[in-house]
Image: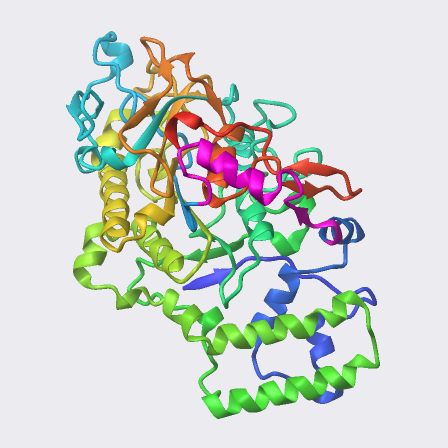
Amino acid sequence: MLRFLDNGYRLCDGTTRREWLRVGGLSLGGLSLASLLAQRANAADSANAASNSAGLSNRAPGDSLRNALGNSLGGAFGKAKSVIVFGLTGGPPQHETWDPKPNAPAEVRGEFGTIASRTPGLLVGELMPKTAAWTHKVAVLRAVVTNDNAHSSSGYQMLTGVPHVPLNQESAVPKPPNNAPSFGAVVRALRPAPGQLPSAVTLPEHIWNDGNFPWPGQDAGFLGQKHNPWLIHCDPSSPDFSVPGLALAADLAGPRVVGRRSLLDDLNRYQEGLSRGPAVASYGIHATKALDLLTGAQSRAAFEIQRESDAMRDRYGRSRFAQSVLLARRLVEAGVSLVQINWTRIKDQPNQGGWDTHAKHNESLKKLLMPMMDQCFSALLEDLDQRGLLDSTLVVWWGEFGRTPRFNGNAGRDHWGRVFSLAMAGGGIRGGVVHGVSDKHAADPVDGKVEGRDILATLFHCLGYHPETEVHDPVGRPLPISRGRVIEAIV
């Protein structure tokens, strides 16, 4: 099953959009998706409306200067058409992945060894044999820093490029002053979708702390709700996976939909004289968008993961996360600019089947986490490469922080934002590169330190946007999409 999450909203006069559609007893016969789309673009909040009207600008710098900058940074500028964020939420360890320390004491290095990768001189953790074969396409960042040891606040920094106020705030909630837009929201604002699908999608669920506290930084924040990435709760691994939000009702054949569209046009003309407010005026646009989604081959086909061969689905793995990664590839093929895949918890597994390995760290990595990650990450790179899409698709191996250098009393590693590792591939990134150095215990950066804002600046650079491209806050003040710097060593 698939479902879209959103809050309900009313028009300025208190009438719900669904009620408004029923004026005169007329109804679209089950097109609830129209309400969903309209809710996502709700214009009722005056502050958001001000922000939205201000919009975005590429005023600084101009196109010629941006092109010159792209040439000066290895030609990566604008090379990515799409981004896939391979999100290992919970905190993947640096020691057993991209920054092993084979010469450290056993209580630091852990029980696993290292293996050679395809990149000469680059050792990775022994539990990454498939990924090791693809490091010639990967740039490794070994000195990423947030200086924040809380999931939600460190995650906010990695999602937005802005440090949370205050740092180390667990179970933080989305509210000012921590309402910077996520990278997905910025992409959606920069790239309005030309087709039937939105330009930014999040799968297969939102990121949350125990108690279902959603992390801040997952929505559009001060940019306004119409730029929220589409959050799609789904399980593509389910045998009966379907897309009810994009399916026609059983009694709606093609000719009937055409008739309903005509009826909608008549209704819109009738209502035009009743109200010309922006919230009402925009509703017809979203109802039309809903019809386009329902009848469009592009949108429906993108979600039909059953079209993939059994061999391909097995190559990624049959877990919910792995099949979401495969679905992300399908969405990128269909024209979505950014897809973020969040790791999902798994019942009856140590640490709830996630990367927050406070206990049984080695067991969790060996039996579940690393094999699943290694399989679907390498499958994604291989699949994109074979389809000729890797050069135009930026893949970001992502987490909110790393793990402590030393094990705790429960044979686990705890939160560590002082230094950790990420990786980027494709979409203008130089492969076979290692940037940044941590100390002998992977506890602190020694050289090449980068922060979340630098990751985002590099992401936007690959998409063709200088970090100084401006967005505007609710009072019209211009703000850059990133205050970071492009990581020149990897582009």
Q: Say whether residue 114 is left or right of residue 301.
A: left
Query: What span is colored magenta in the figure?
Result: 53-78
Q: Residue at x 52, y 19 (%)?
A: 147
Along the line of sight, the residue nearer the viewer: 456 or 283: 456
Looking at the image, residue 35 sits to the left or right of residue 255; the answer is: right
Q: Is residue 126 above or below residue 387?
A: above
Q: Quadrant of the N terminus?
A: bottom left
Residue 64: image location, x then y, percent:
57, 42
Q: Residue at x 41, y 39 (%)?
A: 76
Residue at screen point 36% across, 38% down: 352
User: In this view of the protein, can residue 273 be seen by the observer?
Assistant: yes
Along the line of sight, the residue nearer the viewer: 37 or 363: 37
Q: Is residue 78 above or below residue 128?
A: below
The percent position of residue 114, horizontal first and vertical second, equals: 18, 22
Q: Is residue 210 visible?
A: no
Quarter occupied by residue 443: top left
Total numbered circles? 0
Looking at the image, which residue is at 62% across and 60% down? 40
Q: Is residue 68 magenta?
A: yes
Instruction: Give the image location of residue 166, x and y in percent.
Output: 64, 23
> Where is residue 351 drawn, in percent x and y?
35, 33
